[in-house]
Image (tube, rainbow, N blue to C red):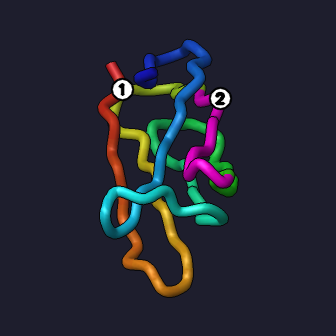
Amino acid sequence: GTPKRKQARKIRITVLGAGNRPVAGATVRVSGAGAKAVRGRTNKKGTATFRVRAKKRGQVSFRATKGGYEATTLRLRVR
């Protein structure tokens, strides 16, 4: 899903490594647009699901990190 201002949305993030293979155990941090900063870990399929409620317009950032991999950030626009 996509974040929407003042509405709780379920957003699923998939972290992929080389060859588009899922990265299990990556830490994903969520922040921005007045949303509560939280973090979670990916499962064996490389996915992590978050309930995000942005309080204002802007961007929500999802930052994925894991040792041995390059960190990456996904930014989604909040309307």
Percent x, y of residue 34: 53, 37
Amino acid type indicated by mark 2: Arg
Q: Which residue is mark 2?
A: 51
**Residue 60 versus residue 70 in the image, above or below:** above
**Foreground pick, 1 / 58:** 1
Q: Residues within 10 Å of mark 2 (few under 14, many from 20)?
A: some
| Residue extending farthest bottom | 68
Percent x, y of residue 5: 46, 18
In the rendered image, which quarter is residue 9 located in? top right
Amino acid type indicated by mark 1: Val
Magenta span contains residue 13: no
**Residue 41 versus residue 36 in the image, above or below:** below
Q: Which residues are magenta?
A: 44-52
Left or right of 68, for residue 50: right
Q: Residue at x 45, y 21 (%)?
A: 1
Q: Residues within 10 Å of mark 1 (few under 14, many from 20)?
A: some
Residue 39 seen: no
Q: Which residue is mark 1?
A: 78
Residue 40 seen: yes
